[in-house]
Amino acid sequence: MEGPDPFAAYHEALEARHLAKLTFAEVRRALQALSSVYVERRGRMAEGAVFDGAGKRAAFALYYGPMHFLLVREIVRALGLRAPRRILDLGCVTGTAGAAWALECEPRARVDGVDRSGWAAAEARWTFARLGVDGRATRADAVAAPLPGPPAGVLAAFTVNELAEEPRRRLLARLVEAARMGSTALVVEPIARRVSPWWPEWAEAVRAAGGREDEWRFRPDLPDRLALLGRAAGLDSRELTGRSLLLPPGL
């Protein structure tokens, strides 16, 4: 997309928003606790352990939100995805993944985000407004959310891994059906296979339906403060990594 990159101004505003009441050290400690939930104690995610305090909420918004934006933007660019009129962001959290795709569209797509967390939906609305994206976010079940009519984009970024087995199977069937009806379905998840035992089954189903599976590694140009936060929490921010499944329209 032509024009100035909105990411830098967004990140600066994000820091001002979340560091108004918390110190950098408090956010760093919360980010360490949050990463432990993601990597070592994923069973606690269903209990709401991700957003069970102001520190963890700020840590997610300040670190994982921007990193998800940058990763999804690179994936969308690398795949050369068509520009949908509307994007449904399932499990949108702070809305950065859906916004990243929307900003790559010409004209910009509208984003509808859904998340089971009321805090996440409110944060996504702030994200959309700050990035200049036409969007809304509501508190709802990502698996049951009505799919938009084609041509549209249906995005599940860092969402499938948090679902139980039965809802996960229902979501896969809905994504395949959305693609068959003329929409583009994109799934993005961490690259570590040990936290996603369901991935091989999904990848096989997507390939059988005419889609593709990819692994990604990008060298990001991070704002200094974002890189510092990652290093301070013991996280390696030198490389953006992820896996994706793409179901193109009209399978």
Image (cartoon, helix red, strand yellow):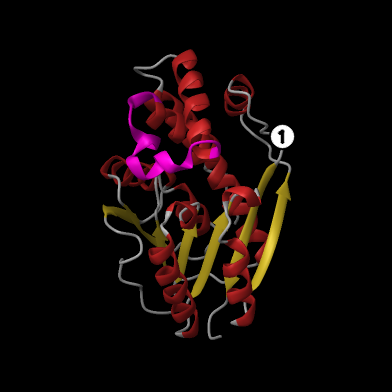
Could you tell me which secondary element the residue under label 1 belongs to? loop
- Residue 222 percent across, percent down from the top left: 64, 34
Determine if the magenta segment contains residue 204.
no
Extent of the magenta region: 39-55
Let me know if residue 81 appears in the view.
no
Residue shown at 49% from the left, 37% from the top: 41
Q: Residue at x 50, y 51 (%)?
A: 158
Taking the magenta stretch, the answer to whether it contains residue 40 is: yes
Whether residue 175 is visible: yes
| Image: 238 above or below 127 | above
Q: Is residue 110 left or right of residue 208?
A: left
111 versus 10 height, above or below: below
What residue do we see at 40% from left, 71% from top? Answer: 170
Mark 1 packing: few (<14 Cα in 10 Å), some, or many (20+)?
A: some
Residue 138: x %, y % from top left: 26, 54
Image quadrant containing the C terminus: bottom right
Question: Would you name the residue on which mark 1 appears?
Answer: 238
Residue 223's place in the image compared with 127, above or below, is above
